[in-house]
Amino acid sequence: MAISDVQEYMHLTDEEIEQLGRELDAIRKDIEESRGEKDAAYINRLIKIQRGLAVAGRLTLLLGTHSKRTRIPAAVAGSTLLALHKILENMEIGHNVMHGQWDWMNDPEIHSSNWEWDTAQPAEQWKHSHNYVHHQFTNVLGYDNDIGYGILRMAREQKWHPMYLGQPVYNALLASLFQWGVALHDLDIERIRKGEKDPKEMKRQLKQIVRKGRNQALKDYVVYPVLAGPKWRTTMAANAAANLTRNLWAYVIIFCGHFPDGALHFTEEEIEDETRAEWYLRQILGAANFKGGPLLHIMSGNLGFQIEHHLFPDLPSNRYAEISVKVRALCEKYDIPYTTGPLHKQYGQALRTIIKLSVPNSWTSSDQPEPPTPSRTRKRKSDDERPSRIKELGVWSRSKSTERKAS
Amino acid sequence: MSGTIPWERVRRAGDKLTTPLLPDDYLRLLNPLWSSRELRGRVEKVVPETEDAATLVIRPGWGWRYDHKPGQYVGIGVQVDGKFQWRSYSVSSAPRRSGRTIAITVRAMPEGLMSAHLVKGLEPGTIVRLALPEGDFVLPDPPPEKVLFLVGGSGVTPVMAMLRTLDRRGSMPDVVLHYSSPTEERMIFKREIDELEDKHEHLTVHRLYTDTDGMLELADLDELCPDWRERETYACGPGPMLDAITEHFETTGLEEHLHLERFSLELGGDGGEGGTITFRNSGKTVETDGATTVLEAGEEAGIGMPFGCRMGICHTCTLTLVSGKVRDLRNGDEFGQPNEPVQTCITAAVGDCTLDI
């Protein structure tokens, strides 16, 4: 069932929901006032480790692949190091820096306005499609383009079409080519297909994607293999494996954020006159966490705390663990469901939904607690059709060129 | 770095290996100074000058230019509690083309958290951010034939750079230095000035200890330096002292021969009229009055505003004004052309305006 009024759905009184909002605001204020030297040291150390991994990986492949004896071990080690570097950069560093989580440091080298991440999608487009569209309209049908990414059918309310029979295959393709899927995300291919996209804007975006994607591909598939000399094939394969590993990992983590069973969808009635407190509540109901140790959380960009991330997208990710204790207590107090589970279970549920929804609704049973609302054809919305923006979602900017030139 | 190696091209080629980052982003992990993305420097020495003042000797990294003019100031950004705080200080060392370090001298102000941190809390080895030298309070080359320096307290720092330059170039003209300090112990560079006075016969120094002898009365100038009207005068010190000097020179019609350096921002005038400021990218808006700077308004609204010196000299805070009008609180200048860059720390809204952040 897609929810049209979160307050009514949770049976909260006006006073209760406003109180919940105030308590969440207080958690936010607490963190804002206590961020300091330790947090700055955390992100700086992580960046150092990640860049160290990159250098170590490239050097291992460059130097280790020449002798017959070390070729295979060097390829495996180099590829692993590179995969770790890419995962850390994309998940815990890039994604979070671009949310503005570290803007408070006033350090132009670690700032959402000019960070460019190590993946094919240009940062500017990511900040629009993710920070703005996804984080403001989280799980609202027709508004949040992250529900299935325009390729998959992830809600029973989305109309079935025979095309969706291929869903398990699309899913596998999306997982292995994830960085390219993400790169095209902000283009909104569905709108292009319907001829609703402004051609000028489309051209501008495409140019950006081509430029960034070309540099990314050149680096991994031309420049480093050429430098490796006669063993260029080994280096190319190792780089491809590192990209594939990062793609699969990022895909799994991201699919655990909003597709496990407990994460609910909403109708557009919900966002009419939505208050800040109701927005908070929608974020809790629409997101799902997963459990794990500190290392798993760092490798997944602390998105195991998806609920906390959605409540406070611009607070430093290293603080989500402590925030989650307080958020959980609040959820218990107000009897709000807090979706979490082990990673394999969360992903398993997402995968099952992908498979089930590839066929018409009547063939399968719903895993959500309540029956789905009747499906409606909903066109995806353009920016002009969306309600005005609300604050604290992290910045996105269109004007500043995020490209850097060697100075 | 000039010569046979085309560094620019080497680095551009390096880009292909490090994209989307720059080679500098990796090199600075080996040595923090090996990056020109943000100017930075390493504190080599902290030399105590008096009880509450110290000279920081800083070695700048890549991208620095050592050709500052004597009297100019630099911006220095230090991470305090994880956050970069910026201030500007006069360079006290003389410019040297072959130089490897610059020196700034800082006095810890009561309630000045940053200055206290710089004087007492900075360890040698600390990496700081730098901004290139700026400022019009400079000694021309060649220097005027007759010079009068009117200096109060830590206002001596830019003048010290000038004196050192004159000393080093061996071009010391006829100079009178009037230097006020609360006490002898708090007089920064006392010994060096004594030595310079011994060395140069055309350098005359008057020392005034204001705790015991009272402030400089400008009416006494005729007695202290009878030919002051013929001299180019450079004054640096506390605001009230500079105000008095300005007034004195204006009444005698000599303001063209007076050069001033003010360190503290004095927001004068009537301010802007206030209005609603919209921050375009986040869509946040905030109502302000005419006395609140755009920077303060943005911070109040929770925008991650870039900021630096907060006194209108470092330009770190500059943002694009998309529409509307702002007024410079220092002098009342108005800025309102479409897409005009404005310094947010010293401007206030005049009616509704929109900023690109």
Image: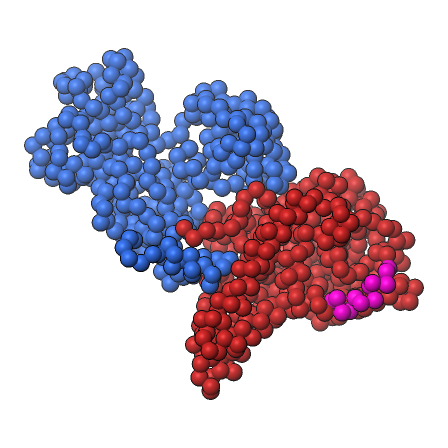
Chain colours: A red, B blue
| The magenta stretch spans residue A332 | no
Q: Where is residue B217 in the image (x, y as percent from the top left)?
A: 23, 19
Q: Where is residue B238 in the image (x, y as percent from the top left)?
A: 31, 28
**Image quadrant of residue B188?**
top left
Q: In this view, does A252 lie above or below A30?
A: below
**Image quadrant of residue B10?**
bottom left
Q: Where is residue B24 in the image (x, y as percent from the top left)?
A: 41, 57
Magenta-colored segment: predominant secondary structure: helix
Q: Nearer the viewer, residue A257 or B211?
A: A257
Q: Work out which residue is located at the far right of the displayed protein and give it.
A: A362
Q: Image check: B171 left or right of B58?
A: left
Q: Image check: A251 left or right of A42?
A: right
Q: Work out which residue is located at the far bottom of the displayed protein and give it.
A: A69
Residue B173 in sight in this render: yes
Q: Which residue is drawn at 22% across and 24% down?
A: B233
Q: Nearer the viewer, residue B9 or B146?
A: B9
For the magenta stretch, what is the residue range?
A160-171
Q: Residue at x 13, y 18 (%)?
A: B226
Q: Which residue is drawn at 71% across and 68% down?
A: A173
Task: Count every numbered label the image shows and give the total.
Answer: 0
Q: Where is residue B52 in the image (x, y as percent from the top left)?
A: 29, 41
Q: Which residue is drawn at 82% across and 58% down?
A: A155
Q: Is residue B270 above or below residue A149?
A: above
| The magenta stretch spans residue A168 | yes
Q: Which of B60 and A23 is in front in this view?
A: B60
Q: In which quarter of the image is the C terminus of chain B?
A: top right
**Image quadrant of residue A66?**
bottom left
Residue A304 in sight in this render: no
Q: Image check: A109 left or right of A391?
A: left
